[in-house]
Amino acid sequence: MPREPFAPPPPDAAVYVISVAAQLTGLHPQTLRTYERLGLVTPGRTGGGGRRYSSRDIEQLREIAELTSSGIGLEGVRRILLLERDNAALRRQAAELAAELEATRAALHQASQAGLGRPRADTPGLPNKLPVLRPRGMDASVVVWRRGR
């Protein structure tokens, strides 16, 4: 029977014991325990309580080591990591809103092409309820209203 090719574990799979994590990061195991105690990294746990680090944890530990070696204190490192996490969340949210805005623009364009929202002959003076579509790149504000999620 042919063997399946080796596939690396997913980035969040907690697979590395503390000694391997220490080797991969160049940090002492006690330093890893200190970083965990300070909340800088949160490794997974086995049923017996042993720490298991993921690839994402290893990358975070390397980033912490780089920051501390450049002279940043642990409180500064903690704040930087929080800001980076918040920044990533805001970037995801901005991308979602941009996609939603693009879908709204497309729907408005399609509705305007279909003649929806134009005054009807039998109701003169009925205002057009579609917003004006402006070419992209112009300085304009668009408000997208959403119902609660």
Image: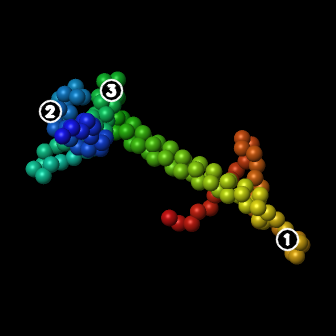
What residue did someone put label 1 on? 120
Q: Is residue 128 left or right of residue 84?
A: right
Q: Is residue 51 left or right of residue 11?
A: left
What residue did someone put label 3 on? 66
Q: Is residue 43 above or below residue 100?
A: above
Under circle 3, the secondary element is helix
- The part of the image, by quadrant, that contains residue 76 is top left
Under circle 1, the secondary element is loop
Residue ID at (63%, 51%): 102
What residue did someone put label 2 on? 19
Q: Is residue 147 above or below residue 19?
A: below
Q: Residue furthest top?
A: 70
Q: Residue furthest left?
A: 48
- Give the amino acid type for the residue marked by disc 3 in the picture: Glu
What crowding class fits label 2: few (fewer than 14 Cα within 10 Å), some (14-19), or many (20 or more)?
some
- Give the amino acid type for the residue marked by disc 1 in the picture: Arg
Where residue 145 sits: x, y (%)? 62, 61
- Give the amino acid type for the residue marked by disc 2 in the picture: Ser
In the foreground, 30 or 115:
115
Where residue 38 sits: x, y (%)? 25, 42
Q: Is residue 14 left or right of residue 106?
A: left
